[in-house]
Image (cartoon, grey):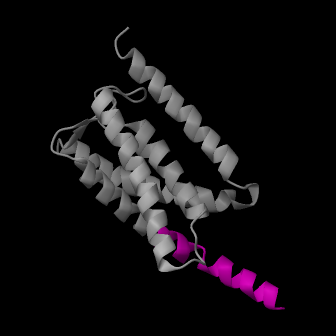
Amino acid sequence: MRYKVERRMEISIWIITSLLLILFVPKNRIREATVSFLFKQLVTWLFGLLVVEKGNITYPYRLFFKKTTKSSFTFEYFVYPSLCALFNLHFPEGKNSRTKLLYYFLHTSFITIIEAFIEKYTQLIKYKRWAWYWTFSTIWISYFISRVYHRWFFKVQHLANADQQGT
C-alpha cells in the first residue's frame, strides 16, 4: 500500500490532537475554544488556499477530501485551529511582555519544527517555494490576529465578570 506511513501518521495526528483538546480544554471554556477554533479555521482557509493555489506548498497525500481541495483538511482545518484554541485558552494574559513573547515563540516554534520534520520525512506536505521561516512567520501572525480577535470577542464577558466580582 502506497503512503502507508503517511496514513498512519495522519491518523495519529488526529488522535493526538483530539486528546489534547479533551485534556486541555476545560468544560467551562468550551465556548472560548470553539470561537478561537473557528476563527483560526477562517484564517487558515484563506491563507492556506492562497499558498496552495500559488504552488508554494503541496500536500501529496491527503486522507480527506482528495478531490475537492488541494489543501490539507487535517492541518489547515483541524490541527492548526485546535492548537490555536489551546494557545488562546492558556495564554498568560496577566504576565509580562517577555513571558508573552516567549509563549508565542514556543508555540510557533513547536509547530514549525513538527511541520519541517513532516515535510522532510513524509509525503504529507512538500515545500515548493516555501521554507520553514515562512511557516514560522505566518503562524506567528495568524496567532497574533487570533489573539486580538479572541480578546475583542470576549471583552464583554471579561467586563461582566469584573462587574460581578466587584458587586
Q: Residue at x 31, y 48 (%)?
A: 48
Quadrant including the N terminus: top left
> From this viewpoint, which residue is outermost toward the bottom?
167
Answer left or right for 73 relative to 31: left
Quadrant including the C terminus: bottom right
Answer left or right for 155 relative to 162: left
Magenta span main SS: helix
Instruction: Read off the magenta span.
Output: 146-167
Is any part of residue 161 visible from this angle? yes
Q: Residue 108 at what x, y percent from top left?
A: 41, 56
> From this viewpoint, which residue is outermost toward the right?
167
Answer left or right for 49 relative to 20: left
Q: Residue at x 30, y 35 (%)?
A: 119
Q: Residue 97 at what x, y percent from top left?
A: 47, 78
Quarter holding residue 20: top right
Residue 11 is one of the magenta-drawn residues: no
Is any part of residue 69 visible from this angle? no
Q: Residue at x 67, y 84 (%)?
A: 159
The relative height of residue 136 versus residue 14 in the rendered view (above or below) is below
Residue 151 is one of the magenta-drawn residues: yes
Q: Residue 9 at what x, y percent from top left?
A: 46, 26
Q: Residue at x 36, y 17 (%)?
A: 3
> From this viewpoint, which residue is outermost toward the top?
1
Q: Residue 19 at what x, y percent from top left?
A: 64, 39
